[in-house]
Image (spheres, helix red, strand yellow):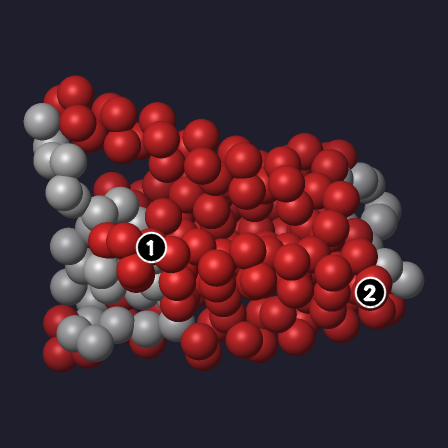
Amino acid sequence: MPFAWWALVGLFVALLINRAADCWLTSARLQCGLTHHPRRRMLVLVALPILFVWLAWQAPGSGEPWVIASFAAILILLAVIDLEQRRVPNVVVLPAVAFALGVAWRDGYLLGAAGGAVLAFAVFLALYALGRRLYGPGALGMGDVKLAGLIGAMVGLAWLPHALVLGILLAGIAAAGLLVSGRAGCGDLLPYGSFMALAAVAILLGVN
């Protein structure tokens, strides 16, 4: 498919992500279309076409860029929602897990994908329980736990440690920047799921 078509598809997906974040997957439906995040909208509209074209350029004539592009779009949508709404909706995560496992079954790496999903879910479930006990509710949400399972299914067991470590690094860098700039205090909570999702996108693009 010509690169121009990939750019158009990326633009269409970007419009869907912005629409979903502003209208379909928000509790403030009465304000649908009246976004308070114009910078996010513009960033998504610019980044997705570039991302899709880059994937097509990396693997010309292959059907696999569609898989990576789909995974990346789902993760970007979840990153946006978690950043703005502090939640990771089941209506996106659960079908995405089934999709990722279906792709893995088709391509013959179901064991690695399922193993990554189970391991990530188990590790973050333990962290969720520990954080709840030490810091109370809010330290880590169940949405983050399910997102970890999705990331494990997408990147597989082999790349899961890289995705999780990169997510921790991104969250740490963001936290340090916010503290230094005075935009956040020591007791403020970060949308950790956003950093997990963006780290997973980076890993997917790196291994493509």
- Residue type, mark 1 in image: Gly
- Residue type, mark 2 in image: Leu
Residue 144 visible to an observer of this rendering: no
> How packed is label 2: few (under 14 Cα within 10 Å), some, or many (20 or more)?
some
Name the outermost residue toward the right. Answer: 108
The residue at the point 59 percent across, 56 percent down is 120
Q: Is the Cβ of the residue at disc 2 closer than 8 Å to that at disc 1? A: no
Kindly report the distance in space between the C-alpha atoms of the residues bearing marks 2 and 1: 31 Å
Name the element at disc 2.
helix
Above-or-below relation of 16 to 60: below
The residue at the point 26 percent across, 25 percent down is 176
Q: Which mark is on residue 9?
A: none
Residue 33 visible to an observer of this rendering: yes
Left/right of residue 72 with respect to residue 36 in the rendered view: right
Q: Earlier in the sequence, mark 2 or mark 1?
A: 2
Above-or-below relation of 206 to 97: above
Q: How far from the left and from the top, in percent, is residue 111?
A: 83, 63
The residue at the point 65 percent across, 64 percent down is 118
Determine which residue is flagged by label 2: 110
Q: Pick the quarter of the image with the C terminus.
A: top right
Q: How far from the left and from the top, in percent, is residue 207?
A: 73, 37
Judge by depth and name the residue closer to the eye, 207 or 112.
112
